[in-house]
Image (tube, grey):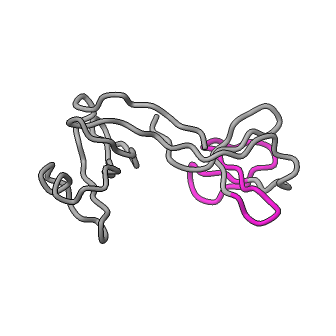
Amino acid sequence: MIRDGYAARWQGREYEASPDGEQVRLYRPDPEDGFDEVRPGRFRRCVPGDEVDELVYIRTMCTWRGEPFIVLAEHDSWLRVEYTGGLAPVARQLGLEEFDFGVYQGWVARDEVTELREYRV
């Protein structure tokens, strides 16, 4: 599973999360007591921030064709990646699209990626 976003540890379990002022929104894919359905397959519970044991940002990184990338998403055997090398000519040579000024992204085959790892910030 590729993760790029906040996670919180609350009552001994880790949840996808989103800080919201003094509270933290916790998310899960299945119903559980205290979690409200916000859409099919998405349940949320707001808890006071001081009740959360840990709040971190998780970022998945990898190397593709010798260059560094953030992994933003996955679909089947493909990964959506964003180049972090900072060299526009290299990004263009790799065939990436300029998503925004200076931001280069693309879909790459998962089996072409090396050094896939998570960082907790």
Q: Extreme bottom residue here?
A: 101
Q: Is residue 23 part of the magenta span, yes or no?
A: yes
- On screen, residue 48 versus residue 109, left or right, reads right
- The answer to which image quadrant residue 101 occupies is bottom left
- Left or right: 17 in relation to 45: left
Count of all numbered marks drawn on residues in the image: 0
Residue 113 vertical placement versus 58 (above, below): above
| Residue at x 82% of width, y 54% of height | 49
Identify which residue, 36 or 19, lies in the foreground: 19
What residue is rendered at 86% in x and 55% in y?
48
Q: Nearer the viewer, residue 20 or 118?
A: 118
Q: Is 45 in the magenta?
A: no
The range drawn in magenta is 19-44
Residue 42, x across and y down, in percent: 60, 51
Residue 11, image quadrant: top right
Q: Judge by depth and name the residue closer to the eye, 7 or 70.
A: 70
Q: Quadrant of the C terminus?
A: top right
Measuring from the top left, give residue 63's x and y in whole percent. Answer: 31, 35
Q: Position of residue 66 (x, y in %)?
A: 23, 35
The location of residue 41, given as percent across then percent down, is 57, 48
Which residue sits at x=20%, y=36%? 65
